[in-house]
């Protein structure tokens, strides 16, 4: 078959997917861009053209700046903790011990638990009056009085980060474990013969095998953490006193709670742009590690 | 093989025990709450293991007596199955031809990368126009409308997985069948699709789990029993004035059961899908 007819055939086969993607992603995205330059409300008026007013207003608002900080803290701490705990768990699961197969199997549990169920579960654990965390800490004498973990601005974000880490570090562990199992035995054996200590072995023999898969996991987890909505909505709705309000929650409130579709759209696009910049930085990083290890 | 000293082996076993407790304790507590009498869950000090095991909440939630908590739960369970099922089938129907085309004709690959790049988009960037669009079509609060919206998430993801699946099938096998006189569609039907069956199954499971887990669009675009999914129903329970925490826990256990069973049984396939997709990009 000739080159051009192959290409035509390929386009025909892709047509249904592309048509649906344009309808459910392309058109809404373009419409969001259009809306972001208007003062449209969710119900009623179509809105007037207001230029870049929405963007200026949103970027200058203290709400946006505070929310951006909260989101960054949430994303950086939870993703960093997930990576460290994930690699440590993978190194452990790669050792010899009784029940290893069972423990490897159990690691899928937190990943499989739906996000909303995970959020509900931790909300019950943190419950100020009857929660298991308060009860356990009281009974072992680490706490004098029950606390409202999700109700105090000082502890709410940290409590959310713990719940998020618990759900996501096992996946990082499983990805890292798969990479560890690909490290050839003779290389680790040779490094032992050459007298490499455990840290040198990790840094120079094992880490090169882990780097590729880990960076991909890092990229995907960071993008997800930056877009986070579900776990926060179910556990705190952004409270108390907006101390856990992330960007997606702020957009939701602006566009749907306050029904300001125009400024909500501009805010959504600012978030999209931030994620895109993040992804571009990572793309460079991925290319560099790919170049250095292969 | 390296000889392990006793202290080292002891240390490894202690760490493994700690990891097992970290993973299991929250899940176990969810289940224990679901079978504890309500009084035990509000007792001080807390009763960690119920004197009498009480499975009645499972019966309450799975009964279909009208206007009961059960009727609402069962309706949302059915909605979740319908939405996730329809969206999965539609996503695969769109993804399979497109993924095969890109795998065999790399010159059109850039369009696929544009589709995959939409993964970065936060759902909030599409939510307002999708809301207007569904309202215009009369598809707000409808399982069909929600399934359509879920294609924004499922279609790029399944296309990505299916493409790496097709890449692993040598095109020489297809060429050989065509040399023997089989047409294109006969070749695909007899040779390619059966070979790609495991990847299709993995993609379908992933897609179903993604849809089962989805919350944001379901929260926005559904409002009552006709379309509310499990995730929204559980968030309603957790955020509402339900006084029996055990009932919330039971709903959580039931919603978690399908993905947990799929996860445990299909672990090997899921992990290889995640890592191969991740590594090949």
Image (spheres, coloured by chain):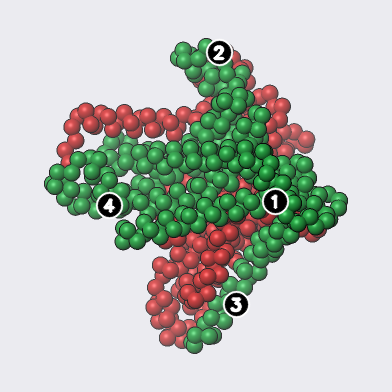
Sequence-first disc among 3 and 2 = 3
Q: Which mark is residue A183?
A: 4
* Coordinates of residue B2 in the picture (x, y in percent): 17, 41
Q: Are marks 1 and 3 in contact (CB under 8 Å)?
A: no
Answer with left or right where residue A49 lies relative to residue A287.
Answer: right
* Coordinates of residue B253 in the picture (x, y in percent): 57, 35
> Disc 2 marks which residue?
A145
Sequence-first disc among 2 and 1 = 1
Q: Are callouts 4 and 3 both on one chain?
A: yes
**Eye-nearest disc, 4 or 2:** 2
**Eye-nearest disc, 1 or 4:** 1
Disc 1 to disc 3, how far (Cα)? Answer: 40 Å
> Disc 1 marks which residue?
A55
> Disc 3 marks which residue?
A12
In front: A242, or A126? Answer: A242
Q: Are marks 4 and 2 in contact (CB under 8 Å)?
A: no
Query: Which shade of the palette goes to chain B?
Result: red
**Circle 1: is it few (<14), some (14-19), or many (20+) Cα within 10 Å?**
many
Question: Is B119 drawn above or below residue B101 in the view shown?
Answer: above
**Secondary structure category for the residue under label 2:** loop
- Chain at tag 2: A
Sequence-first disc among 1 and 4 = 1
- Residue B4 appears in which quarter of the rendering? top left
Query: Which shade of the palette goes to chain A?
Result: green
Sequence-first disc among 4 and 2 = 2
Q: Are marks 1 and 4 in contact (CB under 8 Å)?
A: no
Answer with left or right where residue A34 lies relative to residue B20.
Answer: right
């Amino acid at each position: 078959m000739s080159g051009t007819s192959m290409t035509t055939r390929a386009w025909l086969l892709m047509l249904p997917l592309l048509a649906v993607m344009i309808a459910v992603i392309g058109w809404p995205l373009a419409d969001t861009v259009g809306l972001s330059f208007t003062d449209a409300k969710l119900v009623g008026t179509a809105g007037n053209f207001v230029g870049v007013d929405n963007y200026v207003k949103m970027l200058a608002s203290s709400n946006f700046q505070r929310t951006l900080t909260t989101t960054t803290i949430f994303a950086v701490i939870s993703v960093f903790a997930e990576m460290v705990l994930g690699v440590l768990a993978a190194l452990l699961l790669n050792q010899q011990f009784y029940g290893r197969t069972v423990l490897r199997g159990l690691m899928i549990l937190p990943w499989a638990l739906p996000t909303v169920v995970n959020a509900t579960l931790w909300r019950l654990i943190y419950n100020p009056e009857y929660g298991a965390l308060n009860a356990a800490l009281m009974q072992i004498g680490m706490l004098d009085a029950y606390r409202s973990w999700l109700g105090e601005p000082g502890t709410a974000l940290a409590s959310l980060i713990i719940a998020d880490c618990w759900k996501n570090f096992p996946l990082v562990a499983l990805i890292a474990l798969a990479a560890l199992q690909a490290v050839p035995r003779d290389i680790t054996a040779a490094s032992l013969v050459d007298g490499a200590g455990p840290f040198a072995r990790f840094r120079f023999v094992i880490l090169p095998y882990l780097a590729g898969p880990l960076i991909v996991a890092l990229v995907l987890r960071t993008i997800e953490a930056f877009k986070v909505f579900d776990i926060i909505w179910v556990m705190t709705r952004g409270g108390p006193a907006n101390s856990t309000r992330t960007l997606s929650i702020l957009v939701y409130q602006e566009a749907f709670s306050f029904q300001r579709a125009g400024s909500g759209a501009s805010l959504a696009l600012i978030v999209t742009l931030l994620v895109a910049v993040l992804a571009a930085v990572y793309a460079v990083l991925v290319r560099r590690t790919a170049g250095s290890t292969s | 093989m390296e000889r392990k000293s006793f202290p080292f082996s002891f240390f490894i076993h202690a760490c493994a025990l700690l990891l097992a407790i970290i993973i299991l304790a929250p899940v176990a507590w969810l289940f224990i709450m679901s079978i504890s009498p309500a009084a035990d869950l509000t007792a001080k000090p807390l009763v960690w293991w119920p004197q009498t095991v009480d499975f009645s909440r499972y019966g309450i939630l799975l009964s279909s007596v009208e206007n009961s908590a059960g009727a609402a739960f069962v309706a949302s369970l059915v909605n979740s199955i319908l939405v996730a099922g329809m969206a999965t089938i539609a996503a695969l129907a769109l993804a399979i031809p497109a993924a095969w085309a890109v795998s065999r004709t790399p010159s059109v690959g850039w369009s696929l990368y544009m589709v995959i790049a939409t993964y970065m988009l936060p759902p909030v960037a599409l939510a307002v126009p999708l809301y207007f669009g569904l309202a215009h079509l009369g598809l707000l609060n409808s399982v069909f409308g929600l399934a359509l919206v879920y294609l924004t998430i499922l279609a790029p993801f399944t296309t990505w997985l299916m493409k790496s699946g097709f890449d692993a099938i040598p095109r020489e096998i297809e060429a050989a069948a065509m040399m023997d006189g089989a047409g294109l569609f006969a070749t695909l039907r007899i040779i390619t699709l059966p070979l790609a069956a495991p990847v299709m199954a993995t993609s379908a499971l992933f897609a179903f789990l993604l849809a089962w887990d989805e919350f944001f669009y379901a929260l926005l675009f559904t409002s009552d029993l006709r379309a509310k999914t499990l995730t929204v129903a559980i968030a309603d329970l957790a955020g509402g004035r339900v006084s029996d925490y055990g009932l919330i826990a039971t709903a959580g256990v039931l919603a978690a059961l399908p993905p947990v069973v799929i996860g445990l049984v299909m672990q090997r396939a899921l992990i290889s899908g995640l890592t191969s997709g991740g590594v090949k990009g």
